[in-house]
Structures are given as C-alpha cells and as structure tokens.
Amino acid sequence: MCGISGILSYGANPREDILSMNEGMIRRGPDGQDIFIDEKHRVALGHRRLAIIDVSSAGSQPMVSLSKRYVIVFNGEIYNASELKQKLTNEVGPMPFRGHSDTEILLEAAAHWGLKQTLNMAKGMWGIALFDRESGEVMLTRDRMGEKPLYFGRVKDSFVFASNLNAISRLAFFDNKINEQVLGTYFKNGYIPAPYSIYEDIYKLEPGSILTIKPPYKEWSIEKYYDIAAVAKKGQDNLFEGSINEAEAELERLLKDAIRGQMLSDVPLGAFLSGGIDSTLVVSLMQALSDKPVRTFTIGFNEEKYNEAKYAAETAKHLGTKHTEMYVGYSDVLSLLEELPECFGEPFADSSELPTMLVSRMTRQHVTVALSGDAGDEFYCGYNIYKDAAAGLSVLQSKLPFIKGPLRSGLGKLILRSPAANVELLRTAGRCFSAATVEDFYRAVRDDDVRAGRLPRCKTELPTAMTQYVDGSLHGNENNLMLMDMLQYLPDDILVKVDRSGMHYSLESRIPLLDRDVMEFAWSLPLEYKMYNLTTKRILRNILYKYVPKEMMDRPKKGFSVPVSIWLREGRMREWAEDTLSTSRPLLSQYLDIKLVDSIWNNYINGGDWNALVWYLLVFASFIEKRHL
C-alpha cells in the first residue's frame, strides 16, 4: 500500500515537483520514498511506500523491469502474486527476482503478457502507472471496483496523476479552479462521483479502466478491462442451479480462499469488527483459518442508539479473538473536524467518515493492515431500501390512482416549493411523486435534499452512473438497485471513505467481499438466496450461523455513524459550525447562494430536518477555507 505520482511533459523543476507530490502523500507511504526521471520523454515518477510485503529495499519503487524497458509505480496488493510468479516461471523459465514483493511479480508479468492480460489474471486492489521507456507510453489503471484511488488530468502544460488530490494540488504551478459544475452533484450526494473531481481538468479514473497516453502527452484514451454491469448481466443470465445449501458451501469456500490470500502480510494484521453481519463473518472465517487469535478492533459510543461495541465484544469473546475496543465521544469527533480536508482532498460528506477515521486511528496503533466487511450490503441485498423502494412506488401509485403521472409530478414540485419542504418526510414524498419506475423512486430517495440543486450558483447537472443507469437493465427490482449502487455509491462513497480514512493513518484496508471470484459468484445467485421473506443477506447469515449463534446476531441494523445531527445544534460543535460558515462566507458566496445557506442553517438550528445537507455545507465550507489558507 503506497502513494504514486507522476508528471508527463514536466517543466523546469521535475525533481522538486515530483518530490513535492510525494510529500503530499506522506501518510499513504511513511516508510520511504523515491523518484524516477526520464529525460528523453520528460517523465517523472514518484512513490511513497507503506511496506507490507517484502519490507526490504528489494520492494522499493519506482521499480525498473529486468529488461530495463518498463518502470512501474504501484499502490495496492496482488493477493495471488505467488500464482502469477509460478505461471510466469513456467512460461519464461527461472528469473532472477530481486525479492518477493508483489510489485516485482506484477511488473515482470506486465512486461511479459502486457498490462491488460496481467490485470485479468490478477486478484487484488491497485492503482498502477506503467511507463514504457522505449515508446514513452504510460498506462494508468485502477482495480475492478475502485478500492484504490487514482486521479489524473492536466495542470498547465503537464499531464499529472497521483493517488490523492493533495499531491496534485500542492504542485507549485497548480492553478486549477474549483469545478463549479460538480457542486450540484456534490450537494445531492455528499460526494463527487467519478469521473469528476472538485478541480477543473482533474479527474478520477473509473474502476476497471486503463488509461493510455503517449508522447507528447496531450490526449489520452480510456478502455474498460472489467465491467461490473456486464458481470451482473452474465451472472443473472447463468444463475447458480444448486440448492441454497450448495450455494452456501461454495460461497464459504470462495470467501475462505479470498481471506486466506488477504491475510498474507509481512507486518501485523487484524480486522475491523463492528458487530454486524459482514464484519463478523469476515472475522469468523479469519479465525477459522488462523492458528492463533486474530486481532480485532472496534469503537463504541456512549449514545446507545449508535453503539454496537458491546455486540462486537460478545462475538469476539465467542470467536476467541484478541479484541481491542475504545469508547469515543464528542471531544474525539471534534478533534477530527479540521483534518477532513487533508484526509479526503476534496469535499466528502458521508458523516460515517468520522467513526471510520476514529477506528482506523485506533487500529493503526496495533497493526498495519485491517480486513473489512464492506460491500456485503451492495452484493447481498443488505439495505432496507432495496426491498422498500418497490413497495413505496406501489403504495404511491395505488394511493393516488386518480392522479396520473404528470399531475402527480406537478403536485410533487408544488410541495417542494412550499414550506412543507422543510419537513423531511414531506420533502421525500415530493421528490418521489414524479417517480415512474423503481429506479426513479430510488434516485429520488438518494437525492438528499430539494434545496441542494438550488444552492450552487452554477446550475449544471452532470451525468453520473446513477442518473445514466438504464432502468430495468436486470431482472428484479432489487438487482437493479444493487447494481446502481455498485456503479456509484460503493466506489465513490463507501470505498473512498474506507481507503482515505485508513491511509490518513497509514493503515491498509482489505475487503474480501470484493474478491473477483466472490463478486462474480454473488451475481450468479438467485435473488431469493440474498433476500428471503424480507430477510436481508440470507446466504451470508446462514454461513455466519455456523460460527456464531443466530441469537447473537438477530438485532436491527444500526449502521456505522455518530450523532452529528444532535451535536451540531449544541456546544462546541455548533460553535465550530457557525465559525466555519462565518469565516468562509466570502468564499462561499463565490459558489453558493449565501441567502439560501443562511436560510437552511437557521431553519436547521430551530429544529428543521436538514441533517445531511447541513453536513454537506459544513464540509464544503471547511474545504474551501482550508484551500485558501
């Protein structure tokens, strides 16, 4: 796990510039750094290292291939590196490898088979840049689902890329403006979805993609090597024909294989344990595969509504893990607020970022790698909205049969323009009135607040994976909603939160449920193996109950959050909020309708239901202020 950077067609100070980019990724790679400069093609590559596999200098980067033709900078892990090495040796013969790092195996595999074929064989997570010293061609690529980040674009006359935006924005010649066109999307979602970023001319490489750019580095092309939508379609067209018991056995086998590969590490390793289905299953299988107690970590809250630590402690005791917990509160969250712009590099406002940062910080005090249970909801029908959306649309249509679609839409718009929009339930109903399909209904529910679209001065609506999704692409409402989330919410919210929060404290996170074979098998499962009689994650639960008694896990889903909506109205967090909105006011007025900002805040502190939008505003204001310091 590392940070990578590059400048193509560099300027007068390539060494200083690439070192500056590396400095912007020091948290991603605190164990060392190096650079590579090719004067012929004017290419500078940088790397910061968090040593996980082969912690010796033999694993250092940038790394030059044995043939001297290729240079790689790589962020991530290849879990089946030993298999690739064996296959490579079988075809090429014995090779004088310098060490046992997965970077070296990946590099020689790409030199032999080509990058695309190598990626199709690899299992892991990655952000990679591969430079061909003969042709000057550079290829950038990101893993299948987007666990690892990769930003790219143009700054002045140079093409640049990096693992985080901070590395790019700290360049001495960086002057890219705020991309006002993304603000409408940000204020609706709380994050900026790929391929966009907060800056003009800087983009996120989308998951499962390869970008190719050649001298003089003016234009690039992007192709998909992995498409989760195509995987979903193929899986649903070729459904698993075995019984639920046979499916459980196969999924358990695949998960154990994935977890076994992800437990390989030359540094201390553990797992997050929240007390929910997904993390408990991952830990259960880790412990089943281990001959010593697995290290597990959780944080708790004194507010009972938000606390799952006691359940995590119970399951840890049952499984026999070496468990560490820490209770956190108001002051702990306050200490994080000033770190958000640095941690995420652009406005990111999923409030569960706060507990994720706290558990990452605590975990890093004990281990360097942590496995996570993320992605269970999206692949196994875990969100209640998946089953509720179709029912909601049906109720809407059946309760108002006398009002046809266009009239119902008009009624919705009327509600949204009236004082009734200050009430969250009515606001949601107003958005949903125009829904004609379950996917429409889901978009309306995901669209957090009606005023979001009116906040930015720029009214451009950019297309996203959610808005461009073709309704009814798959059979079954739940399948379509899960796929919609895999195309946007999972990579652009959940995986961003996990990666950035962990790497802010130099902690590598790994997600077994995103193993290629596990994902593809999940899409071949009949829907009733995932959702049955309103029970979510049926197959995951059944596997888990082999390790943990059912009665220990049967409780309502809580999610992973902190009571920000309560704290923002009182004490020091309210002071921070009002100070942030006040000091950033001149800057905010350049981008937002400041009267509407005031209206939303005043309504909120007097009891209005604007929890999400207020947090989005504060995160944006904090970012804008920090950027101009």
Image (cartoon, rainbow, N blue to C red):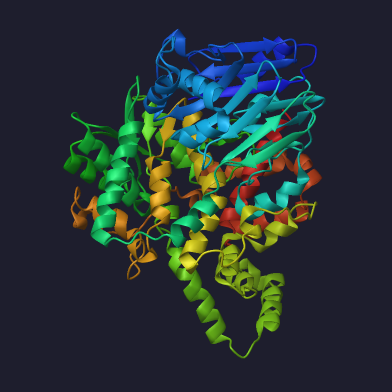
Residue 595 locus on image (x, y percent): 77, 55
Q: Quadrant of residue 453?
A: bottom right
In the rendered picture of this protein, how many numbered marks are placed on residues? 0
- Judge by depth and name the residue closer to the eye, 27 or 357: 27
Vertical arrangement, residue 497 with respect to residue 414, above or below: above
- Residue 535 visible at all: yes
- Residue 579 visible at all: no
Residue name at image x 22 percent, y 32 percent: 290
Horizontal side of 288 relative to 572 (left or right) equals left
Residue 288 locus on image (x, y percent): 21, 38
Residue 49 locus on image (x, y percent): 50, 18
Vertical arrangement, residue 387 with respect to residue 220, above or below: below
- Judge by depth and name the residue closer to the eye, 424 or 572: 424
Q: Quadrant of the C terminus?
A: top right
- Judge by depth and name the residue closer to the eye, 136 or 169: 136
- Judge by depth and name the residue closer to the eye, 344 or 587: 344
